[in-house]
Amino acid sequence: MNSVIIVAAGKGKRMNKDINKQYIKLLDKEIIYYTISAFDKNENIDEIIVVISENEKDYFYENILNKYNFTKSIKVVFGGKERQDSVLSGIKALDKMCKIVLIHDGARPFIDNNIIDSVIRETKEHKAVVVGVPVKDTIKVIDEKNYIKTTPERKFLWAVQTPQAFDVDILKESYKKAYKDNYYGTDDSMIVERCSYKVKMILGSYENIKITTEEDLYIGEEILKRRR
Ligand SMILES: Nc1ccn([C@@H]2O[C@H](COP(=O)(O)OP(=O)(O)OP(=O)(O)O)[C@@H](O)[C@H]2O)c(=O)n1
Ligand SMILES: C[C@](O)(CO)[C@H](O)COP(=O)(O)O
């Protein structure tokens, strides 16, 4: 059984709007609608868990869950202070039959059906898989005073996205260790990497952006227009 945890319990501070960024509309529908739909339509996803903020429960049911006719049943749980805490809430809600778990940002609405399939297929072989894209810019590592320390070789630099997918036992073990060590990472792969598991990077898409700041809304609408 393949499950996806969609984390949508953030505050969206960098978006700087009154409303949680996931409920902002791109063209005529909310960002989180597009994200849930992508997994709802994928025939290899058996379970969908959406992690929301407890204080947005009524809003989510009224404006998303009860409004759109998703085909699959959606399990809703409440998130925590950090992204990692929200993922943990999702992990706790997984069905006992789950073997592969995908973790995806609610704020990445343009995830492609073929990429979801590839992630699942590759996770069967490699147990831990993330999607990403080669960086296009030259990346600099700087010091506290903004002087450049080093320039890593670009051919080894990829920007990581979601979904990130794992064998469920590996993910649970790695999360347990992270909390035991009071370790917080900014993606799920970091949690698994520090337990010495090898994580495979596969090619995602430059369109699989995370809606983070206001200009991403304009880019997002253009992506949608091109797809329609
Ligand atoms: N406590 C948190 C923090 C983040 N997320 C989710 O993790 C995804 C990626 O995080 P990010 O884009 O950083 O969202 P926010 O944390 O909401 O944004 P910001 O850092 O600007 O406040 C988002 O879909 C967000 O809702 C979450 O579920 N719970
Ligand atoms: C998980 C992630 O989307 C991979 O790029 C990213 O690390 C989330 O980070 P954020 O700090 O929550 O934006």
Image (cartoon, grey):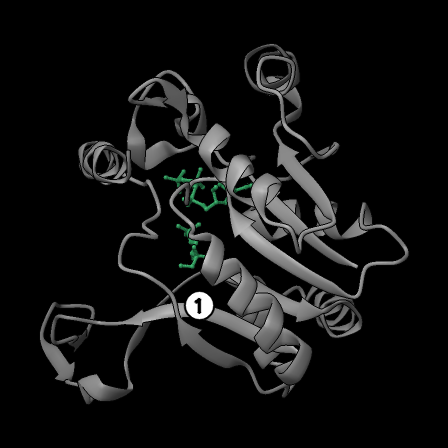
Which residue is located at x 38 percent, y 65 percent? 204
Q: Quadrant of residue 19?
A: top left
Q: For this view, does 156 lie left or right of residue 160?
A: left
Ligand 2 resides in the quarter of the picture at bottom left
Q: Residue 83 location in percent, x, y?
A: 55, 48
Q: Residue 180 location in percent, x, y?
A: 75, 67
Q: For this view, does 218 lie left or right of residue 205?
A: left
- Which quadrant holds the C terminus? top left
Q: Quadrant of residue 154?
A: bottom left
- Identified by mark 1, the residue type is Val
Residue 152 in view here: no
Q: Which residue is mark 1?
A: 131
Q: Is residue 189 above or below residue 67?
A: below
Q: Quadrant of residue 153?
A: bottom left
Q: Under tag 1, what secondary structure?
A: strand
Residue sitting farthest toward the right = 96
Between residues 150 and 211, which one lies in front from this camera angle? 211
Which residue is located at x 90 percent, y 55 percent? 96
Which residue is located at x 65 percent, y 51 percent? 4
